[in-house]
Image (cartoon, rainbow, N blue to C red):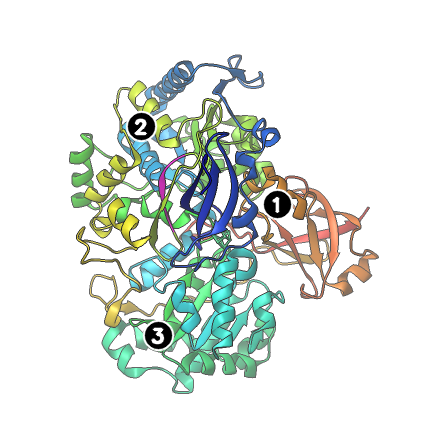
Amino acid sequence: MEQGYKTVRTVCPYCGAGCHIALTVDTVHNRIVKATGANGRTNEGRLCLKGYYGWDYLTDPQLLTKRLRYPMIRKGGKGSPLERVSWEEAIQYTAERLQAIIKEYGPDAVMGAGSARGPGNEAGYITQKFMRACIGTNNVDHCARICHAASVTGLRASIGEGAMSVSVPEIEDAEVIFNIGYNAATSHPIVARRVVKAKAKGAKIICVDPQITETARIADIHLQIKGGTNLALLNAMAYTMIEEGLVDEAFVKAHTEGFEDYANALGGYAPEAMASIIGVPAEMIRRAARLFASSKHTVTLWGMGITQFAQGVDSVIACSNLSLLTGNYGHRVTGVGPVRGQNNVQGTCDMGVLPDVYPGYQRVDDPKARAKFEKAWGVTLPATPGLPLTLVPEKILRETDPKKQIHAYYIVGEDPAQSDPDLTEIREALSACDFVVIQDIFMNKTAEFADVVLPATAWGEHDAVYSSCDRGFQRVRKAIEPVGEAWPDWKIQCAVATAMGYPMSYTSTQEIWDEMRSLSPKFYGATYEKMEALGGVQWPCVDPSMEDRGTEYLHEGGTFATENGKGRLLFAPYKPVHEEVDSEYPLSLCTVREVGHYSVRTMTGNCRMLSKLEDEPGWIAMNPADCKRLGITTGDLVYVHSRRGKTITRCLATERAKEGATYMTYQWWVGACNELTIGMLDPKSRTPEYKYCAVRVEAI
Ligand code: SF4
């Protein structure tokens, strides 16, 4: 390494694959000059384009001018301009406004949102501690609510643990991959590589997706179902397994409960009865069920094509049922992979940035767990779960009792004015909220409604731990000094807590991590030293000695994390989507991702290299037959209308889209598809039905 340069080993900030990166840093000019793949457990030295090129917003002088560099307040109240203030004034102002709201309406009038992006697990731990111990509420949540909360809720009900049971490297050794509602090529390119490797080694692939995705192209069976019929299909596959004697009876007898009731309830789900609803021939459904059951190394992978429906939780349980029925749990290279999207959405769940659990998934309504946290934090904690963030608009706009309304919304590193469904409603709610605080790295859409804007350090400017999608704690390292006056997120919330009279003070992220470990038995063994020595540690890891190197796969020997150790076979009936297409809105809309961008593009949209690849506006992908009917073709500007709003975008005619279905990425600021999406929620996880609403496309 030349003088004046250093190499910093860290983890990519762009998806749950958790790829290791080596950054070359010019220490003289405080800038990153290159990123290359480092040999991590999941990526083996490889990166996708976001890992290679997604960092110039940190060092490019022009892009740096767009960063939030100092604290700002709307001194003149709502509608007035944001004005630069000192950190002292910003912290004091925030503390006083929060205290006044708590005094008038109580602590449950405050909602907190944590970040699953750059800040890391230590910041997540501080966010939930700030909300619980300082504010006094369990109203804390994060973007898992709008993506994989259904996986956590469903898998907890089925097998007692909400995370991936299988590891990313195991995928390439699978004999059968059941890929449902998941496009790895755009979501997690490095996970997609494992799927391709498995195929090359002889694995059979079943792909369930209304789109012709990259995985569909290499699938042995592609079930191009009608959008919104996942549960009908999964129940029909379970029916086939039972009817055709494909069930692993010994496994079911020894390791599950509820089989009789489950089998009886499936009576009406013969593939022949379901085929017209699902939109694929009955024999294909039967073939898929036979192939799934043919191996003890069947790995199920899913993404938001399962979870972002009003029946997301039931569909997650139904996926798990197939693994329980066929003995596909409890050993290496099997089980389920709800593959988390954002780089640290697994970790933000791990840290208890959720309304119902403390760090380590300890329930807030468990008196023993609560007593432990009360003792450690020196406070009395609320005993009932808090508010999921998807209910915030309702609690601002439609709750009539002022004491039950949300009056303050403290948002760390998220952008609900871009990411939440039905943006008209979110904008109304943010406008009506008495006090909104934003901590972020760029001015985002939500900051337009903020009373206080606080500049946070970005990935690359602070230390942290991220959790990969397969439960892997990995160290993220500071490479350069922060821009302007930005502070790490954890330091900001500690300062606000202290100003509110609840002192929180730490000298390093390791000190925070060690406090979190001491309260979380599942994570106690995952020390910084161990992560340093091993490159990462998969939880559960209970013993700090090097004897315990973490856990590659869950539920060893078919012992599940439920109270009696058994997996639960639970039935739910299929229900149609909430908003069917009709003559006024004849096309369905499904939200998807763009491979070169990440989430709502707070980082990648401000990145020169990635913007060169694809910049606004986005597109609406449609089947050529639908385009022909409307007299439009690729590149044409169109309006897309739904019952909630309209947006402008360009048409992309493609055979990938099934006739009658359309697709838009949720990532564009212009042509934002969440102007159209519906706020209908899964009743158990409160996850929105982003994947299906009715729209009309109109040529301009
Ligand atoms: Fe980063 Fe995900 Fe790409 Fe890996 S696959 S380089 S973690 S965006």
The magenta segment is 462-467
Q: Is residue 231 visible?
A: no
Q: Is residue 499 visible?
A: yes
Residue type, label 3 = Asn
Q: Is residue 32 left or right of residue 552?
A: right
Q: Amino acid at mark 1?
A: Leu
Cα gap from disc 1 to disc 2, whole angstroms: 39 Å
User: Nearer the N terminus, badge 2 or badge 3?
Assistant: 2
Residue that label 1 marks: 610
Disc 1 to disc 3, C-alpha distance: 40 Å
Q: Are marks 1 and 2 in contact (CB under 8 Å)?
A: no
Q: Residue at x 29, y 77 (%)?
A: 252
Instruction: Please give the label number shown on residue 503.
Output: none
Q: Camera-side residue: 448 or 45?
A: 45
Q: Which mark is residue 328?
A: 3
Q: Quadrant of the N terminus?
A: top left
